[in-house]
Each structure stands twice: as structure tokens, then as C-alpha cells.
């Protein structure tokens, strides 16, 4: 979306529900819509844990903040997009790339999807 919208925010978890396979974490910024009790209750009913940094404390969510830093460097920096739809499509492709094809030293040379599967099998 090009602007904050509470109705859209409440619908956003619907797209996640079919993908959930056990406990999951949803990271958001401190936008007003994510602080609403109705949104927090929606996440709780779905079994999602909300992750949100305290104000001016990005280390609370260092893992996702690290992803955002890489995304800014690898995806945004120096790029322009023809349209909002083009941006959304390319962002979706980047996130798929990050999760399935981008090997990471901190994950023992695996992609996030491979590492998650490895971790689940180990438990």
C-alpha cells in the first residue's frame, strides 16, 4: 500500500495463515496500526508472536533489522521503479531470492529456507 490503512493492516495476516506451519514471528515497525489492540489480538488468535522494537532500540530485532539493511543495499539503493505494481513484483522476487537462493555465512552457508529445515529436523 502507498499509505497506512487499518482495514488493510487487519487483512494482511490472512495471506500468512495458509503458510503457517507452527509458531511464527511477525515483525513490524512501530506504526500506529500495529500498536492497535485489535491487530495484536488478531495475531494472537492466529498464533503469531508480534516482534516490534522498543522506540530507538533497533537491537531488539537485530535479525530482521539486519535483513532490512541488506535489502536496502541490495534491492533499493540506486534503483528506480516504473510503477508501484512493478515495485511490489520486484520486491516479492527479491524476498523469494533472499529466502531460497541467497546463501549466508551466518547460517552455516545455507539459505534461510534450508537453515530452517535443518533446524526443524534437528529438534
Image: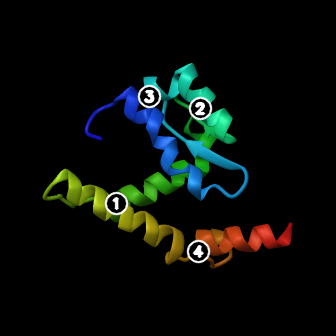
Tag in front: 4 or 1? 1
**Cα distance between the residues tagged 4 and 1:** 18 Å
Q: Which residue is tagged 3?
A: 31
Q: Residues within 10 Å of mark 1 (few under 14, many from 20)?
A: some
**Residue 69 image offset from top left, x and y in percent:** 44, 54
Q: Which residue is mark 1?
A: 91
Residue 120 point in image, percent of width and height: 78, 67
Of pointers 3 and 2, the one earlier in the residue sequence: 3
Give the Cα separation between the discs numbered 4 and 2: 30 Å
Chain-order first, disc 1 or disc 3: 3
Q: Nearer the viewer, mark 3 or mark 2?
A: 2
Q: Give the left or right position of residue 12, taking residue 79 as reference.
A: right
Q: Considering depth in this image, is 88 or 71 the residue closer to the camera?
A: 88
Q: Which residue is mark 2?
A: 42
Instruction: Using the image as rendered, state which of residue 103 and residue 92 is in the foreground.
Output: 92
- Depth-wise, is mark 4 or mark 2 nearer the camera? 2
Amino acid at each position: 500500500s502507498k499509505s497506512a490503512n487499518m482495514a488493510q493492516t487487519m487483512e494482511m495476516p490472512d495471506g500468512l495463515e495458509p503458510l503457517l506451519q507452527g509458531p511464527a514471528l511477525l515483525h513490524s515497525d512501530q506504526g500506529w496500526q500495529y500498536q492497535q489492540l485489535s491487530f495484536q489480538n488478531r495475531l494472537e488468535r492466529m498464533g503469531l508472536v508480534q516482534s516490534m522494537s522498543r522506540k530507538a532500540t533497533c537491537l531488539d530485532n537485530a535479525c530482521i533489522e539486519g535483513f532490512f539493511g541488506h535489502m536496502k543495499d541490495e534491492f533499493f539503493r540506486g534503483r528506480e521503479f516504473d510503477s508501484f505494481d512493478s515495485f511490489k513484483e520486484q520486491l516479492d522476487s527479491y524476498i523469494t531470492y533472499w529466502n531460497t537462493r541467497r546463501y549466508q555465512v551466518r547460517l552455516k552457508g545455507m539459505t534461510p529456507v534450508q537453515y530452517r529445515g535443518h533446524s526443524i529436523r534437528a529438534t
